[in-house]
Amino acid sequence: MTAPSSAAVDPRRWVALVVLLIAAFMDAVDVTVVNMAIPHIQEDTGASTAQIQWVVGGYALAFALGLITGGRLGDLYGRKRIFLAGIAGFTLASLVCGIATTPEVLLGGRIAQGAAAALMVPQVLSIVHVSFAKEERGKVFGVYGAITALGVLAGPLVSALLVEGDLFGWGWRPIFLVNLPLGVAGLVAGALLIRESKAERAVRLDLTGMLLSVVGLLFLVLPLIQGRELGWPVWTWVMLAASVPVLALFVAHERRVIARGGSPLVALSLFTRRSFAGGLGVQLLFGLASGVFFLAWTLYLQLGLGFSPLKAGLSGLPMSLLLMAGAGISMQVLVPRFGRRVLQAGALIAAAGMVLFAWLTGQYGADIALWQTMLPLVPMGIGMGLIVAPLADIILSEVPHEDAGSASGLNNTTVQLGQAVGTALSSLIFFNHLGGDGNPVTQATRMPDAFAHTLPYVAAAFFAAFALLYAVPRTAGSKEKTARS
């Protein structure tokens, strides 16, 4: 289903895209921006270790819980309206975080940030999906994939620069306050430039489905986010077990809503489309690989090798730049010609980078040079770029416009779930291998060996993504597919 013909003559859509991308970048940066500032936040606010864990994890939890509902709200009540509400809430919550003097206020601000991002982020892809013609979307999704991935990778670097720069003597606070001018500009520009869109048929929000989805995801995601830090107490396993029947009840409820001719929170018919179902599976594996790798990598560089936050952030620069280059080449040149095989090649290239990193780490240990830590990130960045940019386009390619927000919310939820599972797996793969008390600070000398032990698992996730991509239509994203649709 192509975009409305009026989109082709709307001169504002490309300028409006800038606003959407700024919002996506702000969210991506804020996922990881706190990590490098943790010692400064603790010293300034007196936050306990548990409170800091919630400052980091509270954003991710609120974000993950609200994405599906946020996407559907855009479908029902207007994607522009919900997007602007999300930007306004995100900006206000950033102000609260930036002026917080107690850990409780900071935590409240971070949770509010995540909830607002859950309103804002799904609208980005859904607005693109309904505003751009099919032949234009490949270019747009390529830029989107590169920008969001760059934001995640840039978060620690931005944090390090702002904290070490100590702007105006504000210490760690600019990592949040920098969102204020961006948010205000985005709010004004979005109101002027973005065109409103929503589902053609006026329906009500599926409140029961919303409640069941939030509870089911809470039971699933909360233990994954907090389990490792808390030592996996009994309640985490109870919640994980309880998530299965709750989510099963959610699916059963959605089927009843559909059978009655109502509007479900999630259109289950989307999962009958190979591009959507297969793409989400790959997205889950991609998030899992990222969750396992980036936590271990950050600790390895700073504690195992003694890199400063700024040096650790700069060491990832090749990955960021090559990811953007890979994303652009993928969407503009390769995917239109070769379809899903480009994504499969990207998975193999990224896996090769992890195998190389494991060999270098095992070979040189703590004596590894900076350039040697950067070398494996070259194939890693290229491979991730070939995957991340076209994947969102493939997932949404066959989604009807009236379900664009719901599908976008599911796409983002899958990424968050994959990253949460990957972070949880780190406790089994990385932290257990440290030995002793498993504390990265006291076991820093064993860090290189533990990191090398982790990398084959990351490579395995990319190999699994390569295999799962066979479930996606061979011509997905290619000109041949476009010609047939």
Image (cartoon, rainbow, N blue to C red):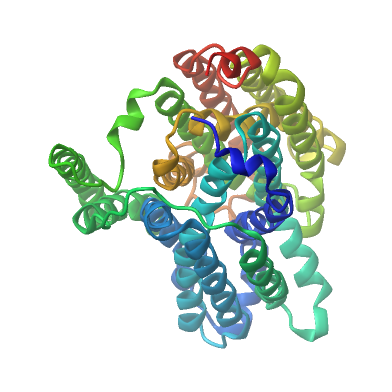
Front residue of this view, candidates 55 and 434 = 55
**Residue in view at x 61 percent, y 43 percent:** 6
Viewer-side residue, 249 vs 466: 249
Which of the 4 quarters of the picture holds residue 317? top right
Residue at x 75% of width, y 71% of height: 163
Q: Is residue 228 visible?
A: no
Q: Residue at x 38, y 48 (%)?
A: 200
Q: Is residue 157 left or right of residue 100?
A: right
440 versus 186 height, above or below: above
Up-down: is 235 above or below 106? above
Task: Give residue 475's position: percent from left, percent from top.
Answer: 57, 13
Camera sees residue 419: yes
Q: Position of residue 379 (x, y in %)?
A: 75, 26
Q: Is residue 239 above or below residue 34?
A: above
Q: Position of residue 369 (x, y in %)?
A: 85, 38
Image height check: is 427 above or below 65? above
The image shows residue 348 at horizontal and vertical percentages of 64, 17
Residue depicted at x 50% and y 18%: 469
Task: Using the image as rendered, state which of residue 99 and residue 256 is in the foreground.
Answer: 256
In the displayed orientation, state which residue is furthest to the bottom.
101
Q: Is residue 25 left or right of residue 328?
A: left
